[in-house]
Image (cartoon, rainbow, N blue to C red):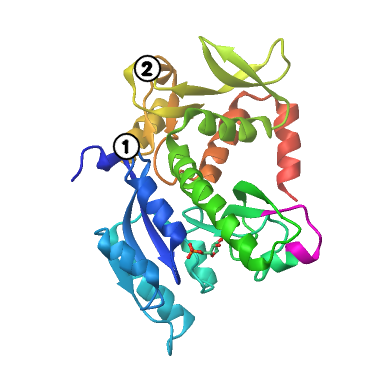
């Protein structure tokens, strides 16, 4: 195993055609300190040119023709190959099949696509001609999270490409591809790294904490935390902890109901919880944020529980009333 490869995100790429975006991802993955490695290139088209390059470059490949099989069978075959390859993420790069809703749901948050338009404009096909016909000054490309609705998931990154007066759909497509080859590797690297990026994790946490009634942010012992109540007399219900006191965790510290509960959580789910230094002694548990597939709803539940323990009853009553709707 090459040095450092353990910490890299493992991605599978799905292609149906030339695979130039796959090539861009492949060579980006070969650069020093790349955030991801490609563990599989899979296709529904045996003759896809991209497969040849993948093989030449020593990547594992897989083909399963969609002809004569149901969407579910096709997806299942592709998924088996992905699972066997041990991929954490699936990246679509010109994969011309719509994936079943069940497949998309199972891979939610770990399935990305590149679409050649400035989304939300021009979902679907013929994006270049549509941009030219509309008289747009720019076309472009978008990297987005795949959701059940076509080309509608959260946009992670975009690149704009100027449209020349003499452009045809083909000439424009060629320039957009050049731009895509810059965009896709960078967007994927950022996305797969964000689970260990303290700024991203804190921003997510902050959004959830400040969505609770009468909350504000305040530093405590040099770390940001969140309080409920007034700026003057509020009480902390959550602390953000970034690799403090020798811990490797980035975490949110929240209040448990008892030391027994805290110890139970830490013993039974050591991948999710730990007992933090100092705060642990007063019943605060660390919910680890820098781990794969953090369930943010679970984090939100913990924040609310902790908030309830600290909030005055006039506020908890408000939340109880709101929860009934
Ligand atoms: C790209 O333009 C991409 O935006 C779209 O399909 C095309 C794939 O091209 N989803 P290639 O096979 O990567 O050259």
Between residue 253 and residue 308, name the one nearer to us. 253
Residue beneath disc 2:
277
Badge 2 density bin: few <14, some 14–19, many ≥20, Cα 10 Å: some
Residue 175 at x, y = what percent?
Answer: 59, 56
Q: Is residue 95 magenta?
A: no
Residue depicted at 34% across the width and 68% down the height: 51
Residue 254 at x, y = what percent?
Answer: 50, 27
Between residue 112 and residue 236, name the one nearer to us. 112
Q: Is residue 266 left or right of residue 209?
A: left
Residue beneath disc 1:
32
Tell which circle, 1 or 2, labels the residue nearer the N-terminal end: 1
Q: Is residue 133 magenta?
A: yes
Badge 1 density bin: few <14, some 14–19, many ≥20, Cα 10 Å: few
Q: Residue furthest left?
A: 1
Q: Is residue 150 visible?
A: no
Residue depicted at 35% across the width and 30% down the height: 263
Helix, strand or loop at label 2? It is loop
Residue 42 at x, y = what percent?
Answer: 36, 68
Residue depicted at 71% across the width and 63% down the height: 122
- Report, in whole angstroms, how far the alpha carbon at label 1 lies from the one at label 2: 36 Å
User: What residue range appears in magenta?
Assistant: 131-139
Residue depicted at 72% across the width and 14% down the height: 231
Give the vertical position of 226 relative to 320 (above or below): above
Between residue 246 and residue 19, name the one nearer to us. 19
């Amino acid at each position: 195993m090459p040095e450092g490869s353990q910490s890299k995100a493992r991605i599978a790429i799905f292609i149906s055609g030339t695979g130039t975006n796959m090539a861009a991802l492949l060579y980006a993955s070969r650069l020093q300190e790349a955030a991801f490695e490609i563990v599989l290139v899979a296709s529904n088209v045996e003759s896809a040119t991209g497969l040849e390059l993948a093989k030449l470059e020593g990547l594992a490949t897989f083909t399963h023709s969609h002809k004569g099989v149901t969407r579910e069978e096709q997806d299942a075959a592709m998924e088996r190959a992905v699972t066997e390859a041990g991929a954490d993420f699936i990246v679509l790069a010109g994969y011309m099949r719509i994936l079943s809703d069940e497949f998309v749901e199972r891979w939610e948050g770990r399935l990305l696509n590149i679409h050649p338009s400035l989304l939300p404009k021009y979902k679907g096909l013929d994006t270049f001609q549509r941009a030219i016909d509309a008289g747009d000054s720019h076309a472009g490309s978008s990297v987005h999270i795949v959701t059940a609705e076509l080309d509608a998931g959260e946009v992670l990154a975009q690149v704009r490409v100027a449209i020349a007066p003499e452009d045809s759909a083909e000439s424009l497509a060629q320039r957009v591809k050049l731009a895509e080859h810059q965009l896709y590797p960078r967007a994927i690297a950022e996305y797969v790294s964000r689970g260990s990026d303290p700024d991203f994790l804190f921003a997510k946490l902050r959004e959830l904490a400040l969505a609770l009634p009468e909350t504000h942010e305040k530093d405590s012992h040099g770390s940001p935390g969140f309080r409920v109540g007034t700026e003057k007399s509020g009480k902390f219900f959550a602390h953000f902890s970034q690799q403090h006191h020798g811990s490797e965790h980035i975490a949110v510290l929240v209040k448990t109901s008892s030391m027994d509960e805290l110890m139970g959580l830490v013993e039974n789910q050591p991948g999710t919880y730990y007992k933090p230094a100092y705060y642990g002694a007063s019943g605060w548990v660390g919910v680890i944020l820098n781990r794969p597939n953090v369930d943010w709803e679970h984090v939100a539940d913990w924040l609310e529980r902790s908030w309830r323990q600290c909030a005055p009853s006039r506020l908890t009553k408000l939340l109880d009333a709101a929860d009934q709707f």
